[in-house]
Amino acid sequence: MSAVQHDAIRQTVRQRYTHIAENEGCGCAPSCCGCAPSCCGGPDNDSAATSQSVGYAAADTAAVPDGANMGLGCGTPLAIADLKPGETVLDLGSGGGFDCFLAAREVGATGHVIGIDMTPAMITKARGNAEKGGYANVEFRLGEIEHLPVADGCVDVIISNCVINLSPHKAQVFADAFRVLKPGGRLAVSDVVAFADLPDDIRNDPTLLAGCMAGASSIADIEAMLGAGGFEQIRIRPKDESKSFIRDWAPDKPITDYVVSATIEAVKPGACTCCCSDTDTPTLRQASADDLEAIRSLLSRCQLPGEDLTEASLRTFRVLVSGTRIVGVCGIEIFGSDGLLRSLAVDPALRGRRFGEQLVTACESAAQNIGIERLYLLTTTARDYLLRLGYADIARESAPEGVRTHPQFQGLCPASARCLAKWLQ
């Protein structure tokens, strides 16, 4: 499939779900994943009954704000997610926020739920629903599920409900899901899968594609993509009873001869056994002059420059400490309302546990407190990671003069390093 075809698929899907978001559902019977002739017919759609037909309890549909449940699912991913208090959950294709709000109930006030959707209208709707429901532990981010705006190794569980089939890049979806999961993190998905080869008249029908049918991959292909992405303990279980509602998605097509809803489970291997256990989480504090040599040593191990650091410059640095060891560092240097974010490093044994994001966030907060409006940085290895934290590429020469004349810009960092910036709010 060409890039042009991929873009066309994405545009078709975005247009459909924009329409659904702006029209308070789509009126499909029994599920908005499909597209019966009455689809997008307006207020006749009973989203609660639709969701209960795919496995949700009446208490679930009653527990969320009006408009959050849009009847868009093909199963109940939370039934296999085994969520625990304090966990971080990521929902791929979060729609109006229905599964996110149910997940928030499970993980509690100490947990966190992130919803990702590529449709701006859906993000707006979900954020409004979160505000109505008072969900302080839920946030919604605009983004594509193939390129998640989420830091590496910070998610305990990924859920998704009838969305991955819509992607023309499913292998990339699973690869990026693997990236953001913590070691030992779980994938818990409800989606449509193919158990027979789809005929061309179904596979090439844009309406059936946007309706969660024509884009279904075979169980064998999904298993192969998950395995290639690094997942283990892969388990895909078709739900034959789902044919009863899938049949109504396309009543003029023999769709249940080819597709069925299934649960998809997988685990990212390698639960952390490093020097810092979950019961010995590093603590964040301001750096002191006594930390200079330890910081330089950590930067050296991470192949980052640190010889220009002085005891005085550490006043605007933050460190992570495990026992007596410094295992993470990040700092800022001040140039009026501009700042240089520098020396971001985490002990290699502790990467993938969101410590880098914690350090960056701490430095950004410190920068805002002293009146810095913009942060700049150079990086050779962390560009993609920082883009996901809200930084953007800029030309080196567009950085302000004070930043450009810093030793890092003048030779400590190689010419191949990329320049990024972030405007603080």
Image (cartoon, rainbow, N blue to C red):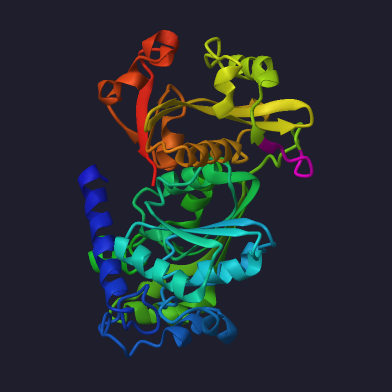
Choose between 173 and 415: the one closer to the eye.
415
Does any portion of residue 200 appear in the rendered image? no
Q: Is residue 131 left or right of residue 281?
A: left
Residue 280 falls within the magenta-colored stretch:
yes
Residue 227 falls within the magenta-colored stretch:
no
Locate residue 270: give its quadrant: top right
Q: Could you tell me which residue is drawn at 75 percent across and 35 percent down?
A: 276
The image shows residue 216, relative to residue 183, as above or below, that is below
Magenta-tinted stretch? 277-284
Locate residue 282: give its quadrant: top right
Q: Could you tell me which residue is drawn at 40 percent across and 45 percent down?
A: 147
Percent across and percent down for residue 212 are 36, 66
Q: Which SS does the magenta portion mostly show? A: loop
Q: Could you tell me which residue is drawn at 28 percent across and 80 percent down?
A: 39
Q: Is residue 235 left or right of residue 343?
A: right
Locate residue 403: give its quadrant: top left
Percent across and percent down for residue 204 are 24, 60
The image shows residue 286, relative to residue 132, as above or below, that is above
Choose between 409 and 287: the one closer to the eye.
287
Choose between 201 and 178: the one closer to the eye.
178
The image shows residue 314, relative to residue 47, as above or below, that is above
Q: Is residue 406 left or right of residue 356?
A: left
Percent across and percent down for residue 261 are 48, 69
Total numbered badges shown on the rendered structure: 0
Q: Could you tell me which residue is drawn at 37 percent across and 82 percent down?
A: 248
Does any portion of residue 26 appear in the rendered image? yes
Choose between 402 and 301: the one closer to the eye.
402
Percent across and percent down for residue 239 are 54, 72
